Image (cartoon, rainbow, N blue to C red):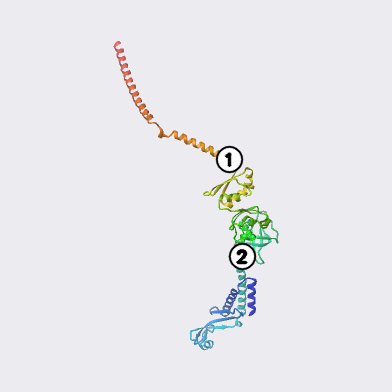
Amino acid sequence: MTEIIEALNMLEREKNISKEEMMLSIEKAVASACEKDFGENTEYSVQMDRETGDIRVYTHKTVVSEIIDSRTDITLEDARMIDPSYDIDDEVPVEITTKDFGRIAAQKARGIILQNIKEGERKSLYTHFKNKEKQVVVGVVQRFVGNNISVSLDDKTDTILSSKEMIPGERYRIGSRIKLYVIEVKENQKGGFRIVTSRTHPDLVRRLFEREVTEIADGTVEIKSISREPGSRSKIAVWSNNPDVDPVGACVGLNGNRVNSIVDDLNGEKIDIIEWDEDPAIYIENALRPSKVVSVDVDPDEKSARVVVPDYQLSLAIGKEGQNARLAARLTEYKIDIKSETQAAELEAALAEYEKYAESLEDGEEDLDVDDVDIDETEDIDDVDADVEDTDADEADAEETSEEEAEEGESEEVEED
């Protein structure tokens, strides 16, 4: 049986399948074969020698005075031949030799062993790639599947790189080697697993720098933030835990060899490496490079910043189609409003005019304040009311006089007649 041990050792070396787990699977398979050959109502135990590979199968029988079922019963005399201490109703393990196995039972055992080998290999591969999550792997382009591509990660494992995870404008050739970022490894209901990979994920840039820059790998230089537009440009903010180490210089490398290697892996994507700073104003100024900055006014509560740049640097600060400003905003997590010096001066002048106008309005409202009305004006109002009453009285007297005169006139006319 030493051939079994040698085979298990080879599987453990080449397939990374646990030797102990395989032995447990073989024991389980042999026990299943016994149930098939001798019946399921009998209890079996299987022991495989870890050194020699010898397999011993035992069935458990009850000591009885008279045998009713030979598969489950054993006489006291036979039991004491195994061990003199046995008595009636004791459980006795009785060895079954492998030559008693039938052909069907042996085939079932073989099938279960092969199935467990396959399952062990699958589990080994799953564990291997599960440990590769959030890491970079190298694959070989195998074929095109519609708009997607199939990439081989090893002899038995493939992954599909979907079109949405491809770098825009990048072309792939069958047989070419590419680096992929493993987003997730998911098991499916059929017992297999799927590896989700990407060429556009920002952390692909992070992992490539960790592999290329030893100062990042050992923790001397730290990547604080990354913003990326795949295939076009990325910005990466770095900081050094050692004041004697220049974080930007460490990432760039001698004659730019480190960053150029990463640019090649990303098919020519430009990378801006800037120094992170705990002061938001300095950090934002660094993030807008290569543009020069005149001033940065930060509002930490609103997470916003107003940046003034020289007139001739405005287009550079904003970038083509706003890319530089957009990447800087993502990198710093601040809303950035960029103005040229001329625009800033015009805005300041407009604000000054507005403030002056607001002050003039405030002054006008003070002149019309009701609290400032003179008390004499109130008295004059009372006098006006009195005059109105007197006028009404005079008009009443005048009306009475007119009526009396009219009556006298009528009397005189009557007398004359």
Quadrant placement of the N terminus: bottom right
Which residue is the site of mark 1?
Answer: 345
Q: Which mark is residue 260?
A: none
Q: Earlier in the sequence, mark 2 or mark 1?
A: 2
User: How many other residues sit within 10 Å of disc 1, few (<14), some (14-19) or many (≥20)?
Assistant: few
Per the image, label 1 sits on a secondary structure element best described as helix
Q: Amino acid at mark 1?
A: Ala
Whether residue 307 is situated above or below residue 262 in the rendered picture:
above
Relative horizontal placement of residue 299, taking residue 368 as reference (left or right): right
Q: Residue at x 54, y 38 (%)?
A: 352
**x and y, in percent, of residue 267 in the image:** 68, 56
Taking depth in this image into account, of 289 and 33 the one nearest to the observer is 289
Which residue is the site of mark 2?
Answer: 129
**x and y, in percent, of residue 203 in the image:** 61, 58
Q: Residue furthest front?
A: 244
Whether residue 211 is situated above or below residue 416 in the rendered picture:
below
Whether residue 123 is situated above or below residue 296 in the rendered picture:
below
